Image: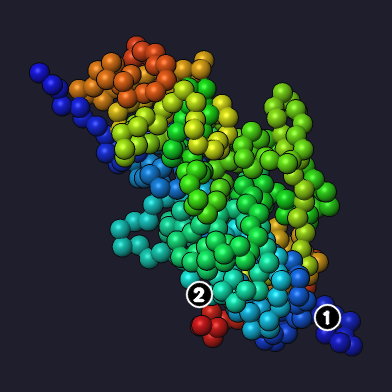
């Protein structure tokens, strides 16, 4: 909200102002699946800013030399909670993991997204049959429900969510592009602060209310980074 | 005289799976070989392919079609969207999977046991652990189908009495398509429904490390029948 005004304006100029100050030891949710929906510029700014001892919650553990991979390379990550860290090009994760420099919590993908959803929806924990009877059930509370073994899974919350969307208005309402939506709407609900980088800003009222995927209620700051400008 | 066994290629296994998908079925295809199934659905049959990352109604790209870098499948390969398709968040996509709304999941497998146990997420080596959506799909889909080579590269059977590798889920696999046969998994045993030409039941039994029943008098039921 701009100072002194009584209107709502979540848009900020520049990626540094959008990210804000991230404390050492923060827990950060990062949207994206593979290369789809990654908030690349926000992650580059996080690297630039220098916060350390981070816990990241994301589907993958980054690949190549940018984004989550760069944070791992520069030893900013203490722990990563993810479902599939073994992508092609996940060189930095593998290097840090093998050296015992990063902790890994491996979570089935649906359990991961549901734990995030629960975090955003005020549900402390839930039971699911996913992973019952497997190695990933080790140490988890189990309960027989409807004749089937279930695991108790706890909600995930974060200090910050970094997401990418296609377009926003000044209230922070968001729409996405094809499958880049993936984790973003759920993470936006589960973090204390949510920052969205978008390709386009539109006037208030220009987004079809029937098509808004993430209401601005869940979004704290929006920064437009035209993809051609950003790269 | 030794008869030539007409083992199926990867594409041929995919076509065999596709032939058994019921019209109207909602189907999730795992990464790797199962992805090929989408390209073999019989002409005129509408099957809805769901991708775990939040796409309902995937299709292979047309030759020369420009890919959208954001529009990918679970294997991170570019795909297209059919008319009638839609996008959803990851949480909603897995609610669809875990809530039993996906009729069929087709996955690769390292091992399947006679009890229907599935091992396909960890090779048991020191590789980086990565599970993806396999456990959710195995636990949530109404019918779990695996497609795989019948033997490992070293010649060991992948259909076994008891899995030696870490489980993805216990007692879930209902149908297996291999380069040699189509099998049902029921009542704690494998049932051979169909053998490739040139293969005898005895040779299939020898390539299978668990009890095998002859069910060749049965026609494999279509997978994922639902009201249209």
Report helix, strand or loop for mark 1: loop
Q: Position of residue B105 (x, y in %)?
A: 50, 37
Q: Which residue is mark 1?
A: A1
Residue at 39% x, 13% y is: B213
Question: Is A150 placed above or below A22 here?
Answer: above
Q: Is residue B64 left or right of residue B169?
A: left
Query: Callout 1 environment at 10 Å: few (<14), some (14 to 19), or many (20+)?
Result: some
Q: In which quadrant of the rendered image does the N terminus of chain B lie?
A: top left
Report helix, strand or loop for mark 2: loop
Q: Position of residue B33 (x, y in %)?
A: 38, 44
Q: Position of residue A22 (x, y in %)?
A: 75, 77
Q: Residue furthest front?
A: A99
The chain to which mark 2 is attached is: A
Residue at 56% x, 74% y is: A73
- The reply to whether callout 1 and callout 2 are in contact (CB within 8 Å) is no
- For discs 1 and 2, the disc positioned in front in the rendered view: 2
Q: Is residue B85 left or right of residue A58?
A: left
Q: Is residue B26 left or right of residue A146?
A: left
The chain to which mark 1 is attached is: A
Question: Is A41 placed above or below B217 here?
Answer: below
Q: Position of residue A122 (x, y in %)?
A: 84, 52
Residue at 32% x, 24% y is: B207
Q: Which residue is mark 2?
A: A65
Q: CA distance from mark 1 to mark 2?
A: 35 Å
Residue A216 visible to the viewer: no
Q: Are marks 1 and 2 on the same chain?
A: yes
Q: Earlier in the sequence, mark 1 or mark 2?
A: 1
């Amino acid at each position: 909200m701009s100072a002194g005004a009584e209107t709502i304006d979540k848009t900020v100029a520049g990626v540094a102002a959008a990210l804000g100050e991230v404390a050492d030891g923060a827990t950060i949710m990062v949207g994206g699946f593979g290369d789809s929906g990654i908030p690349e510029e926000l992650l580059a700014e996080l690297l630039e800013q220098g916060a350390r001892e981070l816990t990241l919650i994301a589907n993958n553990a980054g690949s190549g030399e940018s984004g989550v991979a760069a944070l791992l390379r520069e030893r900013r990550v203490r722990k990563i909670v993810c479902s599939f860290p073994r992508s092609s090009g996940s060189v930095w994760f593998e290097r840090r993991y093998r050296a015992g420099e990063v902790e890994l919590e491996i979570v089935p993908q649906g359990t991961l997204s549901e734990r995030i959803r629960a975090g955003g929806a005020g549900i402390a924990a839930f039971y699911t049959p996913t992973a019952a009877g497997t190695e990933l059930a080790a140490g988890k509370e189990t309960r027989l429900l409807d004749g089937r073994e279930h695991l108790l899974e706890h909600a995930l919350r974060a200090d910050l969510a970094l997401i990418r969307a296609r377009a926003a208005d000044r209230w922070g309402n968001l729409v996405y592009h094809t499958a880049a939506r993936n984790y973003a709407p759920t993470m936006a609900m589960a973090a204390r602060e949510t920052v969205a980088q978008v390709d386009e800003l539109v006037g208030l009222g220009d987004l079809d209310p029937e098509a808004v995927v993430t209401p601005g209620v869940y979004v704290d700051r929006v920064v437009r980074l035209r993809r051609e400008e950003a790269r | 005289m030794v008869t030539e066994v007409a083992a199926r290629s990867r594409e041929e296994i995919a076509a065999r799976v596709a032939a058994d998908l019921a019209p109207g079925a909602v189907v999730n295809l795992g990464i790797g070989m199962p992805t090929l199934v989408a390209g073999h659905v019989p002409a005129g049959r509408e099957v809805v392919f769901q991708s775990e990352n939040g796409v309902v109604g995937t299709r292979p790209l047309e030759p020369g079609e420009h890919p959208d870098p954001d529009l990918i499948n679970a294997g991170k390969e570019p795909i297209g969207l059919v008319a009638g398709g839609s996008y959803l968040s990851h949480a909603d996509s897995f609610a669809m999977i875990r809530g039993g709304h996906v009729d069929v999941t087709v996955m690769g497998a390292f091992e399947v046991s006679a009890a229907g146990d599935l091992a396909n997420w960890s090779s048991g080596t020191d590789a980086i652990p990565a599970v993806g959506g396999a456990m959710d799909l195995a636990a949530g889909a109404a019918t779990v189908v695996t497609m795989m080579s019948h033997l490992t590269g070293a010649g060991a059977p992948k259909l076994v009495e008891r899995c030696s590798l870490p489980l993805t889920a216990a007692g879930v696999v209902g149908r297996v398509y291999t380069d040699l046969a189509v099998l049902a998994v029921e009542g704690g045993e494998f049932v051979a429904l169909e053998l490739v030409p040139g293969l005898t039941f005895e040779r299939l039994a020898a390539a299978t490390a668990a009890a095998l029943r002859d069910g060749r008098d049965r026609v494999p039921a279509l997978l994922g029948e639902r009201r249209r």
